[in-house]
Image (spheres, rainbow, N blue to C red):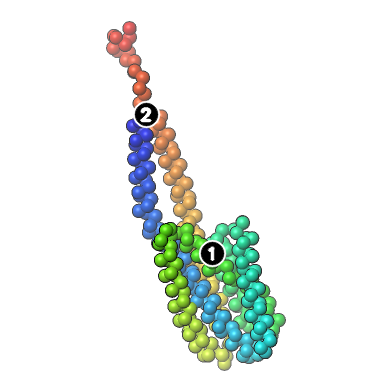
Amino acid sequence: MQAGALSDNRSLNKANNDTTCDHPRKVANIILLWMSGLLYNAIDSSTRNVLVLFQLMEPLHWSVTQVSYGNASGFLITLSSFLSSVVLSRWLSDCSLITIGLLSNAASMLPMAFATTTYMFFIARVLALFSLMPVPLIYSLLSQQVHGSSYSKVLIALQLSLKISSAGTNLLYAKIYQETLSWFPGFVLILSGLISIVAIIPIRIFNSRLSFGCIHQVIEDEEAGQHDLLLETEEPSDDKTICKQCPSCVQ
């Protein structure tokens, strides 16, 4: 009974300590996810707006029909990103899928900046087949870090920050495109590719923190199990202990 009470008290204290220590860890995880989502969403929305001008101006100088084909390729990217996230999630974690999506976006932006013909542009678009996976998966990871009514508050704050950042980067990208149009129209696309690579850093840090947290939890559980086993073996017996020096016990 005494060992069971000690075990219960220890478990209660451990739960309280885990709750206290878990809060700042989750706040840090939310900030990392937030940073990655902001970076990706800002360049994604801004690049879409600039991409229309990139198609209409030199060196591509597309017609209206060709622009509609380019928009259709965007729909195929949406479909391929959805199917890829469904299929690949069986073998890969969400952090790995987000990393693949960011790499896909960077891999498409960098060669697209140097596209001078239609076929070069569409080859670069093929590399973007996984580029729309990050944001939905970031929302999924956020839901695992925040529970209850707090998730709706965090989600609304994230959506608001995404819209504000998109509006700011749209103006910034338009200005950069105007300034670089005369000497290198694809400069904003290279900038988008580099920012996509930078957005990978918070996700990888988040994944490392999750892995370290899981290993630390396993070690604590093993230590707790060994401690409980030790308490059970040391529990005093209710049977009468025989004393060899007492004459009554010897008889």
Rendered residue at 36%/19% (across/down)? 239
Q: On the image, which quarter does residue 154 sit in? A: bottom left
Which sits in the foreground, 36 or 113? 36
Position of the N terminus by quadrant: top left
Quick check: can you spot residue 31? no
Position of the C terminus by quadrant: top left
Q: In the image as oriented, which residue stretches furthest toward the bottom?
A: 182
Residue 189: image x %, image y %? 57, 81
Q: On the image, which quarter does residue 106 sit in? A: bottom right
Rendered residue at 49%/55% (across/down)? 211
Residue 48: image x %, image y %? 57, 80
Q: What amino acid does circle 2 point to? A: Glu
Label 2 residue SS:
loop
Rendered residue at 33%/9% (across/down)? 250
User: Is residue 226 placed above or below 202 in the rendered structure?
Assistant: above
User: Is residue 17 placed above or below 111 in the rendered structure?
Assistant: above
Q: Residues within 10 Å of mark 1 (few under 14, many from 20)?
A: some
Label 1 residue SS:
helix
Residue 152: image x %, image y %? 43, 65
Residue 49: image x %, image y %? 55, 83
The residue tagged 2 is 235
- Total count of labels: 2
Give the label on residue 169, or none.
none
Q: Earlier in the sequence, mark 1 or mark 2?
A: 1
The residue tagged 1 is 137
Q: What amino acid does circle 1 point to? A: Leu
Which of discs 1 and 2 lies nearer the camera? The answer is 1
User: Is residue 80 placed above or below 230 in the rendered structure?
Assistant: below
Q: Residues within 10 Å of mark 2 (few under 14, many from 20)?
A: few
Q: Is residue 227 left or right of 51 when viewed as pictured? A: left
Verify CB contact (< 8 Å) between mark 1 and mark 2.
no
Q: Is residue 31 left or right of 250 when viewed as pictured? A: right
